[in-house]
Amino acid sequence: MNKPITNHMPTAELQALDAAHHFHPFTDKAGLAAKGARVITRGEGVWLTDSEGQRIIDGMAGLWCVNIGYGRKEMGRVAARQMDELAYYNTFFQTTHVPAIALAAKIAELAPEGLNHVFFAGSGSEANDTNIRLVRRYWQVKGQPERDVIISRWNGYHGSTMGGGSLGGMKPIHAHGGKIAGIEHIDQPYWWGEGSDMSEDDFGLARAQQLEAKILELGPEKVAAFIGEPIQGAGGVIIPPATYWPEIQRICDKYGILLIADEVITGFGRTGNWFGSTTFGIKPHIITIAKGLSSGYAPIGGSIICDEVAEVVGSAGEFFHGYTYSGHPVAAAVALENLRIMQEEGVVEHVRDVAHPHLKAQWDKLAEHPLVGEAKLVGLMGSIVLTPNKAKRAKFASEEGTVGLRCRERCFANNLIMRHVGDRMIIAPPLVITTDEIDILMDRARKSLDECYQGLLDDGLMVEKAD
Ligand code: PXG
């Protein structure tokens, strides 16, 4: 194969090569080969272009990560400069370099109080693997090595390495390769789907109290940590009832259990604050970061660690853990430039004061659509649930995800990227989205919902699942 692979090859040729050689993540290989992947060729702001020249509005910021939007030239310039100066050096064995120093200091400045130490990884999954080892090491050093169980939630997502996938509560992931020992799951705070006839507030408390029940079942002396996403992202943008996080916090405090907030999605402005922990009043010992840290321009993640945990683990000799690319200088320089842009351009303030209120006014109204049950939005992270009967919070008779997929296909056809998780539709656009662009996104979303609804009526699919 001598021919260069360019954006100017016919789409069908690119698709054939892709199907032949590229094994995609989380994708049905045979299904994709039959259909052909959509080839994305350019990005600018909130807009993507595909190999057929279509302009698509990206309501998902890539995979929840392109917070400053695509095509910022400063980012490439910083990467090139850093590659010229020092393309690589490691941070093992008592060496360091300026980008890792500067980025760690900047993250400590932005993080909630008391979280001043950063362990770098290449991704969110790696960072959560670090967290498993870190919290177990912490309890070992404290003389309580039997405290090694980590409690997590069903339908949480913490990555897809063995550690991340095990922490996550997605059974299809556990089914492919198993689950590591010492991880226990409790139910998620998903009121619409699982709240039966409880009020949202009572349900939030009940679901949080499952943590206490699990701690008592295992024995508090066995539990190292609890991990949760402030808002479950990949699980379908599940925004917990207001009562949930305060009760989780109370329980972690009562039993002295470390609290890990996985902010891979909610970090760096997504919820209208720098961290979702601030939005929800959570006081974590460790925050997992990735994605928005570099706005996806370079692969980088990490764990922001509180003073106490860093001091304990740091007081007992070497911590046998690290990655070749921990604090990679180019990725760190790119992340630092991303944070400079976010701070100097007031991106978090834009989310809080401009983009969120503008989107919320229209997003909330979607709940009046005949196909939509509830519509929820925190910052620029939103979800709607599709239902054949909103009064009963009914599910569709069709297999879960059938209607969501049909809705996503309408969005795709209307050049809007809006994802489905089961029969929920979710958005998380770049944080720099303007009010005009929000209007375009919402026009396309409403049109897609109308078309989906009409299609369901035509095909006799607005049917409730029997109780
Ligand atoms: N924690 C959370 C909360 C995440 O959302 C990870 C950890 C893992 O990060 P890495 O960088 O290893 O992918 C994530 C990633 C989806 C989807 O379908 C979500 C993620 C990744 C891929 C797909 O919504 N989140």
Image: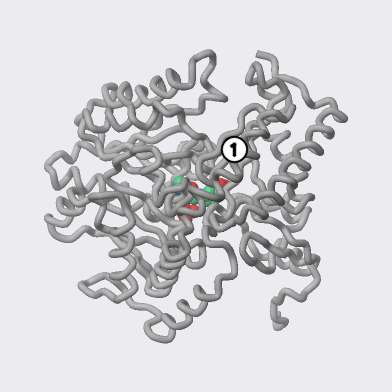
Residue ID at (42%, 48%): 273
Q: Is residue 247 above or below residue 39?
A: above
Residue ID at (61%, 44%): 359
Residue ID at (37%, 23%): 210
Out of 399 and 211, give the one closest to the viewer.
211
Left or right placement of residue 144 versus residue 158 in this view: left
Q: What amino acid does circle 1 point to?
A: Ser
| Residue 419 lies in quadrant | top right
Q: Position of residue 393 (x, y in %)?
A: 63, 20
Q: Is residue 159 visible?
A: no
Left or right placement of residue 436 versus residue 177 in this view: right
Out of 411 and 8, give the one closest to the viewer.
411
Residue sitting farthest toward the front: 353
| Residue 420 lies in quadrant | top right
Q: Is residue 308 visible?
A: yes
Q: Position of residue 238 (x, y in %)?
A: 52, 35
Which of the image's four quarters has the C terminus? top right
Left or right placement of residue 312 versus residue 29 in this view: left
Give the SS element for disc 1. strand
Category of crowding for the residue at label 1, using alpha-carbon neighbours closer than 10 angstroms: few (below 14), some (14–19), many (at least 20) = many
| Residue that label 1 marks | 383
Out of 306 and 199, give the one closest to the viewer.
199
